[in-house]
Amino acid sequence: MVGDSNDNPLVFQTFDRAVKSNPDAHPLFHSDRGFQYTNRIFHHKLEKAGMTQSMSRVAKCIDNGPMEGFWGILKRERYYGKRFTSKKELVDMIENCIRYYNNRRVQRNLGVLTPMEKHNLYLAA
C-alpha cells in the first residue's frame, strides 16, 4: 500500500492486509523505531499474528541495511534524474521495480540467484 503520509492508519492497514494474505506466516517483523511501530496497538497486532518484532537499535542504521540497500538501488536505478507526472506513475515504477528486484535481478551475494530463486531453494531444502 502507498499513502500520502506515513501514519498509523497506513501502517496498520498494510500490516492487516499482509497478515490476511499470508495467514500461516509468522515472520520476524523488522522495522525502525518510528512511532507507528512502537505503540501498543501495533504491538498487539504483532502478538495476535504470532510475530516477533525486531527493531533497529538506536544509532545503528546497519540493522536495517538490507532495506536501506534496496531503497538505494531503487533510487539510483529508477528514480534519480526522472520526472514523474502523477502519483500513479511513481507507484507503478516502485511496484515494477520490486517485482524486477525479487524475480529477475540476480545478486552475487545470493550465489548469482534472484531473491525468489534463493527463497525457493530454501523452501525446497
Image: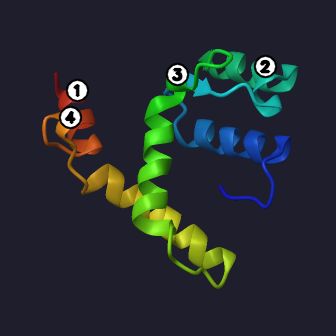
The secondary structure type at the circle numbered 3 is: helix
Q: Which colour style is shown?
A: rainbow
The secondary structure type at the circle numbered 1 is: helix
Front-lying residue, 40 or 22:
40
Residue ID at (17%, 43%): 113
Q: Which mark is residue 110?
A: 4
User: For mark 2, what is the residue?
Assistant: 44
User: For mark 3, what is the residue?
Assistant: 63
The secondary structure type at the circle numbered 2 is: helix
Nearer the viewer's eye, disc 1 or disc 4? Answer: 4
Upstream in sequence: badge 1 or badge 3: 3
Q: CA distance from mark 1 to mark 4?
A: 11 Å
Upstream in sequence: badge 2 or badge 1: 2
Residue ID at (51%, 67%): 79
Nearer the viewer's eye, disc 4 or disc 2? Answer: 4
Side of 93 where 10 appears, left or right: right
